[in-house]
Amino acid sequence: MRRRRVVAMLAGIAFVAVGALLASGSSGHSIPNWRLCRHSAHPTLCCQQHGGCALRITADATPNPSTAGDAVTVRGRVIGVGERGVAVVLWQQLPGARGFTSVATTTAGPGGGYMFVGARGTVDTNRAWFVLSGGQRSRTLHQRVRALVTLTASSTRPTAGDPVTLSGTVNPSQAGQHIRIEAMAGGGWYQIAMPALDAHSDFTTGYAFPQAGTFRLRAVLPSDPRNSRSVSLPVRATVARGPTGIHKIQHVVIIMQENRSFDEYFGTYPGADGIPAGVCVPDPSTGTCIAPYHDPQDLNYGGPHGASNATADIDGGKMDGFVAQAEQGKNCSSTDPNCSPCTRASQSQCIDVMGYHDGADIPNYWDYARNYVLQDQMFESDASWSLPEHLYLVSGWSAYCTDPNNPYSCTNAPENPNTPGAARSATPLYAWTDLTYLLHKYGVSWGYYVFQGSEPDCENPQDVTCAPVKQGPKTPGIWNPLPHFTDVHQDGQLNNIQTLSNFYTAAKNGTLPSVSWIAPNGTVSEHPPGLVSAGQTYVTGLINAIMQSPDWDSTAIFLNWDDWGGFYDSVDPPSVDVNGYGLRTPGLVISPYARQGYIDHQILSQDAYNKFIEDDFLGGLRLDPATDGRPDPRPDVREDASILGNLVTDFDFSQTPRPPMILPVCPHTELVPTPTCHAASDHP
């Protein structure tokens, strides 16, 4: 036996008509109604003479309802006498059509069976069917077709309050129609959005889950003449609680300025551990002593600030070597760390190290202290000058390496690490591990932003004089050491070291990376002979830009000065290891979650910044040779020092985020001479 197939292309769909177990010789003529023979004395013979009689026709469609694109089968039986071989015609009415149209024909097989199979992908809208044979018509079948609706979520494990993009499509096209997005969490379904389908029958909408929990989402197309009510497969979303505690900080910005001691800027700040009464520091050149004094000069000179100078200034805890070190400097006008501008003809420059500023000189810095957090026990990580400090800032160590590809070639060097200077594409210098290695490894975004200009310190601290060195994101320097770290090259992260203009753009667009470091240029650094006013203006502009950013509500700014610059400070630094701590420097924490008017008396160093970043973004992982996956021979893990405080203390994460405090970039000051203020920027 073989099957005979008839294919019809009518009304926009393809049907294969299959007679059930048909014989090859079957006729295809129509048959009279049973009524013609029912009164005959020999009804069976009458039917045979007329080719058969149809009593009735059954019909059914499966699946029904169907989903757009499913293969739909219409089947049934012609019930009567002599059914075999009779013609069976399938009729269809589409939505909006005024009548039915025949779409396929077949013949009944033995027992009267017939079947029509719709090709996959063709039955995509509602319709009505009936079957006609021998003048008899089957019942009308109402084919209900669900549109094919899809739904996807940009994240199925979001955090409460974070926006999630919901998107999908509807087939066949329902362009211009609206589709309901519904959610269910424990109870019934409820609508959360109702976007319109675009010209391609696609939709996109955003939604932020208001609370933690497990939700199911679905897209629902309401019924209309074309399609029955259609529902997507559900999407399950597990929503975590919004960030808590430290994790409310999603952006850390470290602004590093230069060469000021705590007492020089905040020694008279009310409530701070400042300048003690009656202090007087020996002046060997006159045989007298110099007491701290208010110095309103915008240009300060400072003193030598290498490792040996730090030891002499501290003088076993007496904190009395500052004037002597200024007078014993190399009597040069360079800003080499071993240099001093002090000469017998300029005695005021010799005692400049004992001068201090107050709130009238640096009003914005004091306003930040009054409204946010001032740290009065912030010490240098390394008792030395700028380059070691900036190495500690990004890596927790200062070392000298003989092989850039072998971390174990590096030895402790608190004063003389490898000196940068070549283009960043040259062979790296620093083989040990820096913090960006862990950030990159765990997908935490970072940027190191360099204000183009010059750096004031000689790159060799032994040099007596040096010409200003050009600085930019592609020129490694004492304030920009990352381009010379081997792991930054290996990770392909050199382009994360950028011009400062990119930081302003990211702040404006709300696209700040998780971690940002900002290095100044010589003019705005406050490193002598950089003006105090120029630095304050530059820093205020940076902070204003952050406060006006969409990222402000999740940002912490850590403002610090890298070393003491030879200026007087009254507090004997605690010892953590052979490298430090160094002398006190000012530290400020500025954030919508920062405590207001809080003075933090914890012992801190710049290592606390790395600790905060690691706790916030890396789950507490440390730059630890035993665990970080890239061992090096550093002497200790500075972030785990027992005396190091925790910056979390400076925040109140239960408070409503405080609004920005925008300050004038050119505030009135009592500096002398009156500053000529120009807002310093490296952005359009």
Image (cartoon, rainbow, N blue to C red):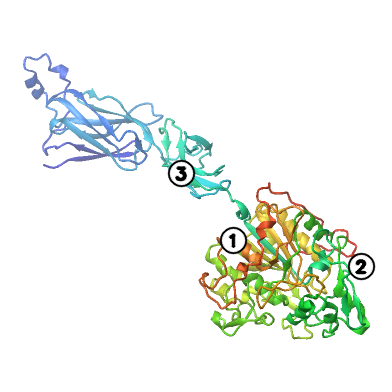
Q: Is residue 300 above or below residue 213?
A: below
Q: Which residue is mark 1?
A: 615
- Label disc, if present, on residue 169 of the rendered structure: 3
- Label disc, if present, on residue 673 of the rendered structure: 2
Sequence-first tag of 1 and 3:
3
Q: Quadrant of the N terminus?
A: top left
- Is 368 or 312 nearer to us in this picture? 312
Q: Is residue 459 above or below residue 128?
A: below
Q: Are marks 1 and 3 in contact (CB under 8 Å)?
A: no
Q: Quadrant of the C terminus?
A: bottom right
SS for dot 2: loop
How far apart marks 2 and 3 lie (CA) works out to 68 Å
Q: Residue at x 79, y 67 (%)?
A: 262
How far apart marks 1 and 3 lie (CA) works out to 42 Å
Is 495 on the left-hand or right-hand side of 673? left
Sequence-first tag of 2 and 3:
3
Task: Give the amino acid type for the residue marked by disc 1 in the picture.
Answer: Asp
Displayed quadrant of residue 409: bottom right
Is the residue marked by circle 3 packed among few (<14), some (14-19), or many (20+) residues within 10 Å?
Answer: many
Q: Position of residue 74 (x, y in %)?
A: 26, 34
Task: Give the amino acid type for the residue marked by disc 2 in the picture.
Answer: Pro
Q: Position of residue 464 (x, y in %)?
A: 79, 86
